[in-house]
Image (cartoon, rainbow, N blue to C red):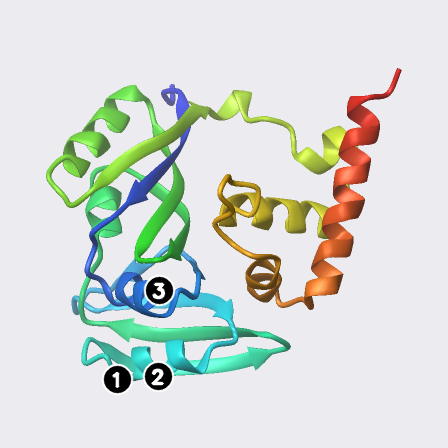
Amino acid sequence: MIAECLVVEVRVSGDDCPLAEATAATRTPVRAEPPQLRADGNVLLRFGAPRDDDLAARLDADDRIRYLHRSRSGERDTYRCLSKQPCVVHELVSAGLLVEAVTYRDGDATVTGAVVGHEVLRGVMETAGETVGVELTRTYPLREEPAPVAGRFGLTPPQTEALRAAVEAGYFAVPRAASSEEVAAELGLSKSAFLERLRRAEATLYRDLFAE
């Protein structure tokens, strides 16, 4: 019998891996697939980011990065490369964290994934305690995963994407941590297109909230 599966989110700060340092220097957010540690010790990285030549230049100039490839689609770039330096995420994986995605922003990383049972979670957090700045920010049983926002409130996928990106970027924070231009760039949209999606999403949510 498989133990209870828990969805977890951890925030990593102080990591000196190439992606963390590049986002700290450029302020360009990066969304990465789970890094793959190869048998030769190199790490296969696949990630996307808003179009930013400074980010590409910094990665290309980093001696730890090899075979950097960039492809462009609209206002977003997709990258593939090898890194000679494993990141903190690999220590968490070795402890039992099943990583689904990693988002780098301003030098910090938000890692989402799952663990099988509370014992494994404790092992992951014990490992985290031995690394730089790892904090458990969210956890819940997989069977209790909240229904998708779109399904509960009738949002369209683009509206859901715009709303989620705004929340994650701190657009609604006080004081505001990201401008509409920055969130729009992360989504590969114009400012007007992003704001239109956001207003339509807000109208749908408020209509449902105040419905009699």
Q: Which residue is mark 1?
A: 61
| Circle 1 SS class | helix
Quick one: quadrant of the N terminus?
top left
Q: Nearer the viewer, residue 168 or 127?
A: 168
Could you tell me the amino acid type at mark 3?
Thr
Inter-mark Cα distance, 1 to 2 = 6 Å
Direction left: furthest residue: 130
Residue most extreme to the front: 175
Do the numbered discs 1 and 2 sit on residues whose CB atoms are within 8 Å?
Answer: yes
Point out which mark residue 21 bears: none
Q: Between disc 3 and disc 1, whose residue precedes?
A: 3
Left or right, 20 with reference to 100: left
Q: Where does the image place residue 180, in percent across and percent down from the top left?
A: 61, 57
Which element is circle 2 on? helix
Marks 3 and 2, the one that precedes in the sequence: 3
Residue 23's label in the rendered image is 3
Tell me which amino acid carries mark 1.
Ala
